[in-house]
Image: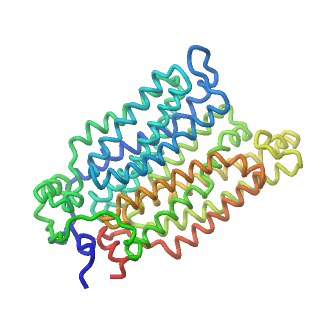
Amino acid sequence: MTPEFPEDSQPLLRPLGESAPRSRRVFLAAFAAALGPLSFGFVLGYSSPAIPSLRRAAPPAPRLDNDATSWFGAIVTLGAAVGGVLGGWLVDRAGRKLSLLLCTVPFVAGFAIITAAQNVWMLLGGRLLTGLACGVASLVAPVYISEIAYPEVRGLLGSCVQLMVVTGILLAYLAGWVLEWRWLAVLGSVPPTFMLLLMGCMPETPRFLLTQHKHQEAMAAMQFLWGSEQRWEEPPVGAEHQGFRLAQLRRPGVYKPFVIGVSLMIFQQLSGINAVMFYAETIFEEAKFKESSLASVIVGVIQVLFTAVAALVMDRAGRRVLLTLSGVVMVFSTSAFGTYFKLTQDGPSNSSHVHLLAPVSVEPTDASVGLAWLAVGSVCLFIAGFALGWGPIPWLLMSEIFPLHVKGVATGVCVLTNWLMAFLVTKEFSSLMEVLRPYGAFWLASAFCIFSVLFTLACVPETKGKTLEQITAHFEGR
């Protein structure tokens, strides 16, 4: 039986010998693409140090009230959701490289508008633009890196996407200690500008070039990235590259990875990561840290360290093992976090999250500090567990499991799902706390983490050491 899409049924790139490519330029190209996620992380981290100074600002500088503060953080997720759809369209039509170059424009423009802001609407407009760029970068960078990397290092390089995101968040926290919000926005425009310069010198992915029948350019890209085009051969490409059609959802090679990709994004946001980050500074205050802002830096350092660990072991341990281990750690940490709130909130009058920790002050000091350290341990354990698996791996798998002819649309839907879920969780978390009480909300997150572990064991395939074409063949049952 002849496959409907020949370019997905046989390798577009096949090694001629047993030895793996030796060139290090693939790491340079991956770094250039990962500057997009670094910019994306800086956008996410920017609001934490910027909001306090914007709330204290005196005229003529713009000043944020409570409602504007909420939108200052949340509007990024709406922009990113739109950016995910735009990125899915761009990645198949403009290509992976050009899409990354184009996303630098809203990054720089958005930070420029924030820098020059004279009112709240300019601040929100700038945040919306940077959010749009985040959506494009969060989709295109993993796709670009997965297509230029050979199987032996794809897990390492793919995990660097999330590593750069958390590094960007940490940089924003650290810079926020010494820079006020306008200069912090100026600093935010540096990584995308650097990406524009460096990415302009990198090639398009060979796989995308082959689907466009640009054979000479594909050979030149392979020479640049892997050191020797003679190590690789190009099989016949067959039919011209085709776009996505709804009828293709009947094919197991399309609907299986589609369900897995969307589910991974949903479980990532339902894990409780936003809730834990929301309470981090308050919990560290109760543990008697002198500077509450230190909590953000500690959380950022833990994220960077454990994401780096995940990147280093990804190609040896495998995706399934790390996802499962990560999920188990999050189950225990969110359960402990919920227990902390249960022990400190038995009073019937504590229904509002504004007064969540008020009962602690009426207990003996040693006991209250001890309980607070239980919460600190739970926060740190959760962040470490999340960074080890459920932080980087959904983005990595999204870039690996979809066949080329549907990759733009499918990854666009995954990114849209992730950012819409992030928006809903962020905006509705306070309401959920009032209905379920804080301990109930975190125990609910623990239940979602259990479901995520079961889903991983039942549905998520192992992709380490496989070419992208072998992964597609697995879903097709070949």
Tell me how many marks there are: 0
Q: Depth check: 344 or 102 in front? A: 102
Q: Depth check: 57 or 154 in front? A: 57
Rendered location of residue 351, percent (x, y): 82, 46
Q: Is residue 27 visible?
A: no
Q: Is residue 434 visible?
A: yes
Q: Residue at the location (22% across, 51% down)? A: 204
Which corner quadrant of the image does residue 269 belong to?
bottom right
Q: Residue at the location (59% across, 30% down)? A: 51
Snapshot colouring: rainbow
- Image quarter where the N terminus lies is bottom left
Q: Judge left or right: residue 181 versus residue 476.
A: right
Q: Judge left or right: residue 366 versus residue 237.
A: right
- The vertical placement of 404 against 123, above or below, is below
- The vertical placement of 463 against 101, above or below, is below
Rendered location of residue 236, percent (x, y): 15, 71
Rendered location of residue 210, percent (x, y): 18, 61
- The vertical placement of 243 against 381, above or below, is below
- Image quarter where the C terminus lies is bottom left
- The vertical placement of 56 against 77, above or below, is above
Q: Residue furthest bottom?
A: 1
Q: Residue at the location (89% across, 48% down)? A: 347
Q: Judge left or right: residue 269 versus residue 215.
A: right
Which corner quadrant of the image does residue 466 belong to?
bottom left
Q: Residue at the location (52% across, 25% down)? A: 181
Q: Residue furthest top?
A: 60
Rendered location of residue 54, percent (x, y): 59, 25
